[in-house]
Every structure is written in structure tokens, then in C-alpha cells.
């Protein structure tokens, strides 16, 4: 009996000593996700009262209407019949929206993980007609700090925002840090979406997008990029009922789409690829051009492709330049010229004029009559009082978007370009 009591006392002593040991705690700040439920996401397409332009994304033009994306929130719509006085029409609320494309009366948009088709025949009363669920990657908005990301519960919905909070938790010996598989929305993080030139449209029933567009229309097909690689294809013969077709993976990352005649140009972090659209349901690879790692929107005229390369945290690399590629032999594109720039983003080409958005250096306009010899001496104009990231040339009016707002210029006389109007960005209440 005494022996049993001895062992019992030993056990109690060990438990007492272990219980008296100090526990170690870690205190840190964390970004806890704020969710929008899937039910709310899929019942939220609507027009609302006029909203301020706070975080401008991409621009789109169709039938004298101007569409300006409010990043991750929806689309501002203006009647741009008179570019000197664009008239605000409505705001179409589309949560998680970055890209749009419009054919006829149907607006196609990404809404976080879904593709939606919205009838805008009555611009003040947009109506969702069809939704294809779960076709885009689950992405989250960028955090505005270096704090950790809290655990994401995908069953609760999409991440709408972050709630920063302080956490105190016990550090357990042999614990290892947990890393979550989070994909950031690239456009949300960079806030530098750019636009595509007017020459790329193949039908007057479609609108005009820009050089970093990830949605592109060709005849009865819609092409979209799904976060980096996959090109999804939708048959829109019946516009209100887009039907998913077999898509494809290009040879490297896909960031931007541009269509010229029956050719699809794909810009990626390591090069440009060219596909034939003779059979639009099954694009066929023709050729490609490789460059060092960088973001690279592309626009094209009859004989040349113009590609801007820029450095930033998302794309990597440290090169900032314009590349001029001869595509007269479409099966063998050749780099013919490079021009050092500051931090070029979107670009557009119209006739012999090349418009380049060069970030803090503003909007640059070049004489591109001889692209292979083009240098800074060929620069015709520079508007360095704006932060330009996006352009659409319309033949005589240039649409420009940047972090500081939307601008329109009359370039009927390229040597005497005139500012027609400016829509200012409103500071966020946050």
C-alpha cells in the first residue's frame, strides 16, 4: 500500500511541476476575412444611385456609352455623346468585378468566381439574364498591410474585405506556421489596368476594350482569362445564354488579350503568343515571341505588335521598355526595336500614332511612322500632369484612365491635342 502511495505522489508532483511552468503566448495582428455570402453575391446585380469614382479600373466604350470599372465593385456608366460633358447615367453594382465585354445589349462580367450576362438594353435598369457559377479562381482583395492572413473558410462565401484585429494565442511547442493558399486578384493589387486599341474590334456590335483586357469578343465567341493560364471560351450565339466550350492553356502565362482581324494575341509574363481564329471555337497556335519576365500588354496594327514591359512586385523583373515586333511574317515575329521608358502600362495605336501610358510620367504620344527606328526623338507630346495607365484611341478622341481619374483628349490635330473633359477620383471615406 505504501509503495502505491509513493508512485501516486510522484505522479502528482510531476503534474504540479508541469502545471507551474509558464505558458508562452504570441501577440500579433491579423487580417480576418469579411465575407459576402454566395446567396448575396448571386442576388446583387442591380443599378444604384450615382457612386463616386474612388478606385478606377478598366475602361470600355460602346455606342457612345463610357463604362468605367470601379475596382471589385461594379461599373460607372456615362453617356459620352458629347465628350466635353460626359453625363452620368448609372452605376451597375457587380461585386468582384474587374473585366467586362459588351455585344449588342448584353454585358458580360466577372463577379468574383462567376461569369454573369447582364441585359443593358435599358441602361438604367440592368437585368441579370444568366450566370455561370464557379468558373473563375477564388481570389481575395489585396491587404493594405503586412499582417498575416487569417484562415479562409471557403464555405462562407467570397472575401469582400479584411478586418484587422489583434490576436493573442498560446505557442505550443513543436507548432509550425500555417501558410494558406491565397490567390490575390492581380488587378486589385496592381490598380493599373489598361485598355485596348480600336483597331482590334471585328464587329460593330461589340464594344472597345484595352490592352490589358482579359475579356475579348470575336464573332459569336467570348474569350476570358482565368487567373494566369487558362483561356476559357464561351459560345454566345444566343447572347443571353453563354455556353462554355473547351478552352485551352497557352504556352506560358496569359495576362492580356488582343484581337486583330482573325488573330488572337496573348500577352504573358514571359512573352507574346499568336493564335489563329479561323476556327474560333478552337484557336490554333501560330507563333510566339519571348522576353524577360515582366508585365506585357500588347496592341497591334497591320505590320507591328507593340508591347510594353514593366517591373512590379506581381510580374517580377526590373525592365521598363517598349518592344516593337515585326509581324509581317506572322509565323516568325521579330523584335526590331526597344525603347527605354519609366514604368509603362497600357498603350493604344491609331494610324501612325502610338499612345503609351507611362505611370507617373503620364501620357506619351509617339510618331510611329517608322516603328523600327522610333526613339524618344519621335515623341510628339507628353502629358506628365496625369497618372496614365489606360487608353482607348477612337479616331479623334482619346480615352485615358489613371489613378487620378478619367481624361478625354481631342487628337484631331495631334500637335495640338486638347483636353476635353476630366472625371476626378474621390478620396475614399476609409
Image (cartoon, grey):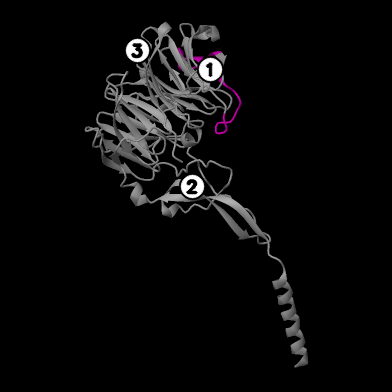
Q: CA distance from mark 1 to mark 2?
A: 37 Å
Mark 2 sits on what residue?
162
Q: CA distance from mark 2 to mark 3?
A: 43 Å
Query: Under tag 2, what secondary structure?
Result: strand
Q: Earlier in the sequence, mark 1 or mark 2?
A: 2
> Is residue 320 shown in magenta?
yes
Question: Residue 83: x and y, percent?
Answer: 31, 19
| 203 or 104: nearer the viewer | 104
Q: Residues within 10 Å of mark 3 (few under 14, many from 20)?
A: some
Query: Residue 69 falls in which quadrant of the image?
Result: top left
Q: In the rendered view, tell whether residue 28 sits above or below residue 365.
A: below
| 262 or 167: nearer the viewer | 167
Question: Would you say the residues marked 1 and 3 are in contact, meaning their CB atoms lie under 8 Å apart?
Answer: no
Query: Under tag 3, what secondary structure?
Result: loop
Q: Earlier in the sequence, mark 2 or mark 3?
A: 2
Q: Is residue 345 visible?
A: yes
Q: In the image, which is nearer the foreground, mark 1 or mark 2? A: 2
Mark 3 sits on what residue?
396
Question: Residue 336: x and y, percent?
Answer: 54, 12
Query: Under tag 1, what secondary structure?
Result: strand
Picture residue at 77% right of the left edge, 86% below the top: 6
Question: Residue 310: x and y, percent?
Answer: 55, 24
Q: In the image, which is nearer the foreground, mark 1 or mark 3? A: 3
Question: Residue 134: x and y, percent?
Answer: 38, 45
Q: In the rendered view, tell whether residue 165 sits above or below residue 402.
A: below
Amino acid at each position: 500500500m505504501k509503495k502505491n502511495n509513493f508512485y501516486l505522489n510522484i505522479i502528482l508532483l510531476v503534474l504540479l511541476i508541469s502545471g507551474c511552468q509558464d505558458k508562452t503566448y504570441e501577440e500579433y495582428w491579423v487580417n480576418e476575412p469579411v465575407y459576402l455570402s454566395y446567396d448575396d453575391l448571386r442576388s446583387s446585380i442591380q443599378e444604384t444611385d450615382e457612386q463616386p469614382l474612388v478606385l478606377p479600373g478598366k475602361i470600355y466604350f460602346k455606342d457612345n456609352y463610357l463604362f468605367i470599372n470601379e475596382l471589385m465593385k461594379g461599373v460607372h456608366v456615362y453617356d459620352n455623346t458629347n465628350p466635353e460633358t460626359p453625363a452620368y447615367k448609372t452605376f451597375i453594382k457587380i461585386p468582384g468585378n474587374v473585366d467586362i465585354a459588351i455585344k449588342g445589349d448584353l454585358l458580360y462580367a466577372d463577379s468574383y468566381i462567376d461569369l454573369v450576362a447582364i441585359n443593358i438594353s435599358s441602361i438604367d435598369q440592368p437585368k441579370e439574364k444568366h450566370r455561370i457559377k464557379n468558373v473563375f479562381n477564388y481570389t481575395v482583395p489585396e491587404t493594405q498591410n503586412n499582417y498575416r492572413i487569417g484562415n479562409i473558410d471557403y464555405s462562407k462565401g467570397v472575401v469582400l474585405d479584411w478586418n484587422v484585429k489583434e490576436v493573442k494565442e498560446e505557442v505550443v511547442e513543436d507548432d509550425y506556421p500555417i501558410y494558406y493558399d491565397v490567390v490575390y486578384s492581380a488587378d486589385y493589387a496592381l490598380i493599373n489596368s489598361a485598355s485596348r486599341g480600336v483597331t482590334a474590334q471585328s464587329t460593330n456590335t461589340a464594344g472597345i476594350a484595352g490592352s490589358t483586357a482579359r475579356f475579348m469578343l470575336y464573332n459569336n465567341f467570348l474569350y476570358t482569362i482565368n487567373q494566369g493560364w487558362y483561356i476559357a471560351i464561351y459560345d454566345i450565339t444566343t447572347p443571353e445564354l453563354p455556353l462554355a466550350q473547351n478552352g485551352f492553356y497557352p504556352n506560358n502565362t496569359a495576362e492580356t488579350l488582343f484581337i486583330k482581324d482573325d488573330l488572337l494575341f496573348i500577352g504573358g509574363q514571359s512573352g507574346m503568343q499568336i493564335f489563329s481564329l479561323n476556327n474560333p471555337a478552337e484557336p490554333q497556335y501560330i507563333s510566339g515571341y519571348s522576353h524577360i519576365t515582366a508585365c506585357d500588354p500588347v496592341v497591334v496594327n497591320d505590320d507591328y505588335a507593340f508591347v510594353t514591359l514593366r517591373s512590379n512586385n506581381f510580374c517580377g523583373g526590373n525592365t521598363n521598355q517598349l518592344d516593337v515586333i515585326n509581324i509581317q511574317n506572322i509565323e516568325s515575329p521579330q523584335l526590331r526595336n526597344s525603347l527605354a521608358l519609366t514604368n509603362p502600362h497600357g498603350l493604344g495605336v491609331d494610324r501612325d500614332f502610338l499612345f503609351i501610358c507611362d505611370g507617373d510620367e503620364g501620357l506619351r504620344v509617339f510618331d510611329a511612322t517608322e516603328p523600327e527606328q522610333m526613339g524618344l526623338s519621335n515623341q510628339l507630346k507628353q502629358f506628365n500632369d496625369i497618372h496614365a495607365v489606360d487608353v482607348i484611341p477612337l479616331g479623334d478622341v482619346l480615352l485615358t484612365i489613371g489613378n487620378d481619374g478619367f481624361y478625354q483628349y481631342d487628337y484631331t490635330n495631334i500637335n495640338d491635342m486638347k483636353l476635353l473633359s476630366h472625371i476626378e477620383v474621390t478620396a475614399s471615406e476609409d
